[in-house]
Image (cartoon, grey):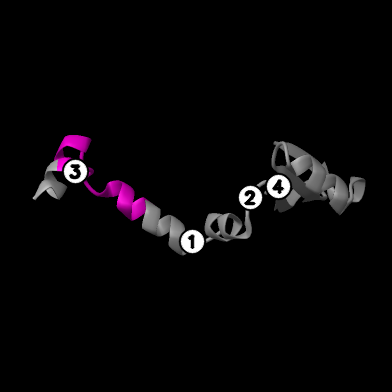
Amino acid sequence: MKTIDIQNTNLDTCVTDAQSAPVVVTRGGSPVALVVGVQGLDEEQVQLGASDKFWRLISARRKEKSLDRTDLEKRFEG
């Protein structure tokens, strides 16, 4: 992660740098923004990645009991 003061950079530099690692932008030593590169992602991936609702859903599903392949196949045999 790179940290840079807002007075020592511009948006183009931050975006370029953020493609390889997140950039924390500071003002007077305090963080004011985080620039994260999304090059290579499509719009839906970016929207889901920023969605609290989506991540709550993922978190809830991860807490559920999972099935191994054998049990899953048994469920669909019938």
Q: Single out the mark in the foreground, 2 or 1.
A: 2
Residue located 48% across and 61% down the image: 52
| Secondary structure category for the residue under label 3 | helix
Q: Earlier in the sequence, mark 1 or mark 4?
A: 4
Callout count? 4
Q: Of 65 and 1, which appears nearest the observer?
A: 65
Residue located 28% across and 48% down the image: 63
The residue carrying mark 1 is 52
- For the residues labelled 4 and 2, say whether their Cβ atoms are less than 8 Å apart: yes
Where residue 53 appears, x then y in whole percent? 44, 63
Q: Single out the mark in the foreground, 3 or 4.
A: 3
CA separation, marks 1 and 3? 30 Å
The residue carrying mark 3 is 72
In the picture, measured across the screen, residue 8 lies left or right of residue 34, that is right
Q: Earlier in the sequence, mark 1 or mark 3?
A: 1
Q: Single out the mark in the foreground, 3 or 2.
A: 3
- For the residues labelled 1 and 4, say whether their Cβ atoms are less than 8 Å apart: no
In the picture, measured across the screen, residue 19 lies left or right of residue 54, that is right
